[in-house]
Image (cartoon, rainbow, N blue to C red):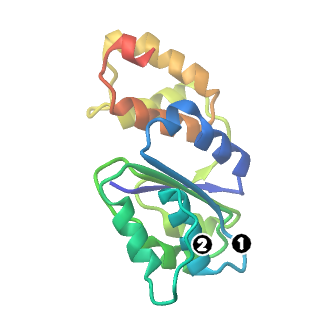
Amino acid sequence: MLDVISINSGKTTLAYKVYNDKSVSSHFDIRSWCTVDQKYDKKKLLEDIFNQVTGSASKYRDNIDVATELRKHLFGKRFLIVLDDLWDTAAWDELTRSFPEAKKGNRIILTTQDKKVALHAQCQSDPLDLRLLRPEESWELIEKRVFENGICLDELLDAGKEIVQNCKGLPLVVNLMAVVIAEKDKKKTVWL
């Protein structure tokens, strides 16, 4: 299912580190990073995303529906798209039809300085007002995301706590690591 992870207060640096993290990048079939200017051009932005997704540098004729082509290309693939510095809800509304909803663990990371935009884009995950999480908060988030009953298997506790320690309290990193390990075998060796 498509989920939007909104980072309030323009946390571009954190989003960039997560986007380029090896374990995160290897989890997704397709990744795209686009900065949304305050005065953005919807078609140009969609073309930028499409070109990153396909690895091409095509220019489109006016009669091509880039949003539909992007949606077709993303369908059936696991993708991570970063929309950096989104300024208004109208821009989000115009972009959403380009992203298919599928049960592939797709994610959109949205950075914004406007809490209203973050709340408007919310799907499943609450917008992140970033402060560092305490280890017990990080662990609770992982347990909720990874296990159906929200309780970790005893044999995974040590590995899970090590994962939490490596996330260094960064909420987005904890959330994305939970996404990654939720789809892995629930074995200590795999988690480590």
Residue at the image position 28 percent from the left and 51 percent from the top: 103
Quadrant of the snapshot with the N terminus: bottom left
Please state if 182 lies on the left or on the right of 109 as rendered: left
Counting from the top left corner in percent of width and height, residue 29 is at: 42, 45
Q: Against 177, is 102 above or below?
A: below
Counting from the top left corner in percent of width and height, residue 162 is at: 53, 15
Which of the pair 141/94 is nearer the observer? Answer: 94
Q: Against 1, is 49 above or below?
A: below
Please state if 124 lies on the left or on the right of 22 as rendered: left
Residue at the image position 67 percent from the left and 67 percent from the top: 114
Q: Secondary structure at mark 1?
A: loop
Q: Name the residue type under label 2.
A: Leu
Can residue 126 be seen at all in this image of the molecule? no
Which of the pair 152/70 is nearer the observer? Answer: 70
Q: Mark 2 sits on what residue?
A: 45
Counting from the top left corner in percent of width and height, residue 91 is at: 57, 77
Can residue 143 be seen at all in this image of the molecule? yes
Q: Secondary structure at mark 2?
A: helix
Residue density around tag 2, few if under 14, some if 14–19, many if 20 or more, within 10 Å: some
Q: Mark 1 sits on what residue?
A: 37
Residue at the image position 42 percent from the left and 34 percent from the top: 180
The residues bearing labels 1 and 2 have C-alpha atoms spaced at a distance of: 9 Å
Q: Name the residue type under label 1.
A: Asp
